[in-house]
Image (tube, rainbow, N blue to C red):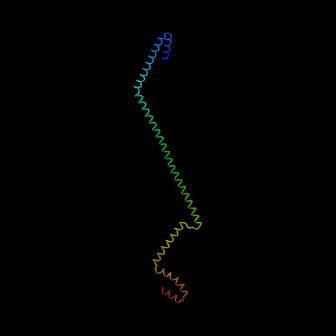
Amino acid sequence: MVKKLKQMADKQAANSKSAFDSALAGAVKESAQQIWLAGMGAFAKAQAEGGKVFETLVKEGVSLQRKTQSVAEGKISEVTSKVSNMASMAGEVGAKAGQQWDKLESIFEERVARSLNKLGVPSAKDVNVLIARIDALSKQVAQLSKAKPAAAPRSAAKPTAKPAAKKSVKPAAKKTSRKAA
């Protein structure tokens, strides 16, 4: 197009001024007509192929969406597994911390027990043993008192009678022992 204009300009330069104006106007008119027709052709082609292009773009969009979803799901599963691993590690750490506290508590209890033992304070175990012995002895006393009800007062009366007998006359002591028998 530029070449045509140059050629026309050269021709018009040779011709008169009026011929130049009419030729230039004709060239501009012809050029504008061609631009208009090219635009119309592009529009018609876009309309004809626009549906195909639109469908192609939709297919590419669906494909891109699927790829994006699969990548996102992969990242979500990675994050989920990392979070679950961290949660299990936190549980393990908590369990280990609990074990350490238990060890510390038992060490503390042992040292306190040793210190109290050195001071002569009986432990709970010692007290429980004594309570068990007292209970056993109480049961034995109860059984003995049920089995020999008359024997228990005699044994209690004899020690009181003997000191009284020593202070008093011996024949009187014999009489009291005979009466008790």
**Residue pushed farthest front?**
18
Residue 106, compared with residue 152, is above or below; it is: above
Residue 137, placed above or below residue 58: below
Residue 151 horizontal/vertical position (percent): 48, 80
Number of numbered discs: 0
Could you say where residue 8 lies in the image, as x and y percent from the top left?
Answer: 48, 13
58 and 3: which is toward the camera = 3
Horizontal and vertical percent for residue 105?
55, 59
Q: Residue furthest right?
A: 118
Quarter where residue 146 is shown: bottom left
The reply, left or right, for residue 118 in relation to residue 140 is right
Q: Residue furthest top?
A: 15
| In the rendered image, the vertical position of residue 144 relative to residue 16, given as above or below | below
Viewer-nearest residue: 150 or 36: 36
